[in-house]
Image (cartoon, coloured by chain):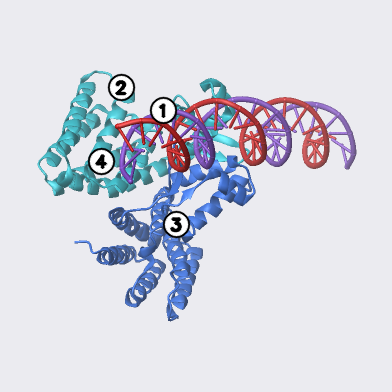
Chain colours: A blue, B cyan, C purple, D red
Amino acid sequence: MATSSDRVYRQIHERILSGEYAVGARLREGELATQFGVSRTPVRIALQRLVNDRLIDFTAHAGAIVRGYADAEMVEILEIRALLEPQGARLAALNRKQEHLDELFDLCARMEKLGDRNDLDFSKIAPLNNRFHQVLLDASGQRQLLVVTTSLIELNNVVQSYRKFARADVDRSFAEHRQLAKAVERGQSDLAAAIMLAHVHAALANFKMRIGAP
Amino acid sequence: MATSSDRVYRQIHERILSGEYAVGARLREGELATQFGVSRTPVRIALQRLVNDRLIDFTAHAGAIVRGYADAEMVEILEIRALLEPQGARLAALNRKQEHLDELFDLCARMEKLGDRNDLDFSKIAPLNNRFHQVLLDASGQRQLLVVTTSLIELNNVVQSYRKFARADVDRSFAEHRQLAKAVERGQSDLAAAIMLAHVHAALANFKMRIGAP
DNA sequence: TATGGAATTATTGCATACAATCTGGGATAT
DNA sequence: ATATCCCAGATTGTATGCAATAATTCCATA
């Protein structure tokens, strides 16, 4: 699609994920329309789509604001991922094609390269991490699983604090990614599922520790 | 909200779930606008929301058609429910409030009453069944789990054939509902999770048998 | 000074008009 | 006869104007 509303949607979407539009920020139709050089009509369509991505809150006559997620909600989302993604990894090991493996290993290499730097740039790492998980779900051949889980993965990007990991955690996470890719390559479905479960639970434990949860 | 787009959305939504707008049916903005006595503008907003419910397919310049789900996709959806709903039942047993119990038992009674008739009216049973599962998820206190899973439950209603069960299956299903409600009432979280797992897997096996899957 | 309310302003909701695009049929050339 | 191109109708995409609603400010009053 090359429609205006689609361009506007993607732009706003990206700006929310990048943090340019911060949580709580008001998104006025008129402002956005002027900014993107279109009328309010395509902006309205774009905003409606963002509601369904659960990236903005929209109430009639009151407008749209960038939606935030409380720590507890982020925990819930990670717990759901802990239920879904191991199954995705298991099926990926059984159904993956060569193109999936190529992209998975490529993503591993790129993330590791970014991880070698002294200052970790999470704004660059996060999209690669997301993509890794999405490719794995795509490789599972389960389209519904891909759709449902992808939206959850994106939401984890909204909370900026989630991106901040200690060096050791990043190294461990990248190592798990590579183990996952290898298990999937070799068709070791149980192993892949187990690694993914540990991987998500590690992120969960990490997040809980950061927010000082019980 | 009392906006026109909201009314239109709910009406179309209901008509799709009820089967009045069949799978594959083209939804023209102009037709709908005339039919509901509004302009195309609120209709477009409503259609956009239905896209995000994954109830219609929408491609630019080509319009909207009621989306169908292939048997394999429906299996995928049930498999996802088999991952999520047991966890919902487990937490419901721990977090449920009295109002949840009241509604669960009420729904059981109403379903059983409908089940006593000689001719099973699935158009009446299905909404109660859906509601039962939703209340259980609501009782879990996990808002994200509720949102994610509810959309999946609704999709199972799109396929009409899914509604057709044999008498024995209906009786078994209702019995499981009541066992679930009791387990939740007593706070037996493991039991509730186990019953739910069996419940969804029974629906899954049933569906696979109907479509003649391996 | 604090408070309540009314008017004003800003913003969203809807309708209409027009532009862009797709679809289908028929004419024409091979 | 068949394939291709083009045009007309239909449908969606966008812009704009106006109505409806919510937020804000300012003034009157306690």
Residue in the picture at 40% in, 26% down: B18
Q: Position of residue D29 (x, y in %)?
A: 35, 30
Q: Tell which subunit mark 1 falls on.
A: B
Tell whether label 1 touches label 4 (CB within 8 Å).
no
Q: Earlier in the sequence, mark 2 or mark 4?
A: 2
Q: Which residue is mark 1?
A: B14
Q: Is residue A153 visible?
A: yes
Q: Which residue is mark 4?
A: B138
C-alpha gap between disc 4 and disc 1:
22 Å
Q: Position of residue A1 (x, y in %)?
A: 61, 47
What's the mark number on residue A79?
Answer: none
Residue type of the residue flagged with mark 2: Asp
Residue type of the residue flagged with mark 1: Glu
Residue in the picture at 39% in, 62% down: A160
Q: Which residue is mark 3?
A: A22
C-alpha gap between disc 4 and disc 3:
29 Å
Tell whether label 3 touches label 2 (CB within 8 Å).
no
**Residue B71 in which image quadrant:** top left
Q: Tell which subunit mark 4 falls on.
A: B
Secondary structure under tag 4 reads helix
Q: Earlier in the sequence, mark 4 or mark 1?
A: 1
B22 relative to B99 in the view: left or right: right
